[in-house]
Amino acid sequence: MKKKSWYSWVVAIDIIGPILIAIGMIFSKLTEYIGVTLFACNIVVYTAYLLAYLRKNALDNKATFFLGLSCLAFYTVVVLSILYPLLKKIFFLTILDFIPVYGSLHAFGFVLCGLIGWVYTVDFIKEKAVNRLHRSSLVRFML
């Protein structure tokens, strides 16, 4: 993927967001809300860009599957978080019921599937480069 002009902002927010959340949890709810909002919006930008990229570019099927699953898991976490107040009233869920679901979806869905997808992507790109190198060597040999 090519670095876009906004890439450095995404990285900065990835670093600053969790720090703001942690500081906010200790000192200020407003700081926590700002951190959560920045961090969540940042991941929305990342996943939207990634899904658009996957749609336009051919990658290994396994890489596409795991990266798409990672994005889907993130959006599921967001929707469940938004619906939590309603789910709490309908199903009598407590925060202690919700945290394992949220944490598992985030850890295994978003993070682990994303990591697996990026590993497959790197392998695919390396294999593609090696094949390109072999073809160019073969052409030089034949000339």
Image (cartoon, helix red, strand yellow):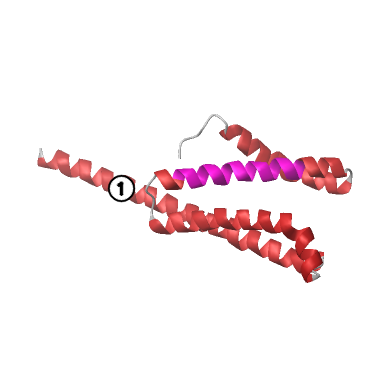
Quarter that holds the C terminus? top left
Residue at (77, 61) in percent of width and height: 86
Give the residue drawn at x 78%, y 68%.
90
Q: Is mark 1 on a helix, strand or loop?
A: helix
User: From the viewer's perspective, is residue 64 above or below residue 52?
Assistant: below
Indicate left or right for 19 with 59 as reference: right
Front residue (pair 18, 83): 83
Residue 138 magenta = no
In the rendering, at what x and y percent does residue 56 appear?
Answer: 40, 43
Residue 26 falls left or right of residue 108: right
**Residue 53 in the image, given as x and y percentages of width and height:** 46, 43
The residue located at (48%, 43%) in the rendering is 52
Amino acid type at circle 1 is Val
Quadrant of residue 43 within the rendered picture: top right
Q: Which of 115 and 110 is in front in this view?
A: 110
Q: Does residue 87 appear left or right of residue 13 in this picture?
A: right
Residue 98 x %, y %: 75, 65
Circle 1 is placed at which residue position? 130
Task: State the residue in front, 135 or 112.
Answer: 112
* Magenta stretch bounds: 35-53
Give the mark count: 1
Q: Which is the main secondary structure of the residues drawn in magenta?
A: helix
